[in-house]
């Protein structure tokens, strides 16, 4: 299960890095080349989104509300697809 959560974190970091990369390409590239490079990145991200399984993280708690200093019991599930 921890492997799945780590995988989610890596995907989040990858998405953040690609966002920074797209911003850097937009800032450094000439105006005529920027739409082509951004379109290519967008196309690659759409293709990846269609091919990759969506990972979901669910959490279950033992009660709806807690008072201060109460023990919280929880269970987390990481699910592919």
Image: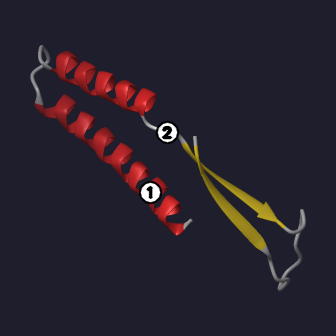
Q: Nearer the viewer, mark 1 or mark 2?
A: 2
What kind of element bears circle 2?
loop
Looking at the image, how many numbered discs can be counted on the residues? 2
Q: Name the residue tied to disc 1.
A: 7
In x, y percent, where is residue 66?
87, 72
In x, y percent, where is residue 33?
12, 18
Circle 1 residues within 10 Å: few <14, some 14–19, many ≥20: some
Q: In this rendering, would 79 be left or right of 39? A: right
Q: In this rendering, would 3 be left or right of 30? A: right
Q: Classify residue 46 by image quadrant.
A: top left
Q: Can you tell which mark lies on residue 45?
A: none
| Most distant residue in the bottom direction | 69
Q: Residue at x 18, y 17 (%)?
A: 36
| Most distant residue in the top direction | 32
In x, y percent, where is residue 2?
52, 68
**In the image, is residue 26 above or below residue 12?**
above
Q: Classify residue 31 by image quadrant.
A: top left
| Most distant residue in the left direction | 30
**In the image, is residue 51 above or below residue 20?**
above
Q: Residue at x 48, y 54 (%)?
A: 8
Q: Quadrant of the C terminus?
A: top right
Alpha carbon separation for disc pair 1 and 2: 12 Å
Q: Can you tell which mark lies on residue 53?
A: 2
């Amino acid at each position: 299960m921890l492997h799945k959560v780590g995988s989610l974190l890596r995907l989040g970091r990858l998405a953040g890095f690609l966002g920074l990369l797209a911003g850097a390409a937009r800032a450094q590239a000439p105006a005529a080349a920027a739409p082509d490079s951004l379109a290519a990145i967008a196309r690659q991200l759409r293709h990846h989104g269609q091919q990759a399984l969506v990972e979901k993280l669910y959490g279950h708690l033992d009660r709806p509300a807690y008072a201060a200093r109460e023990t919280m019991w929880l269970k987390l599930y990481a699910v592919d697809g």
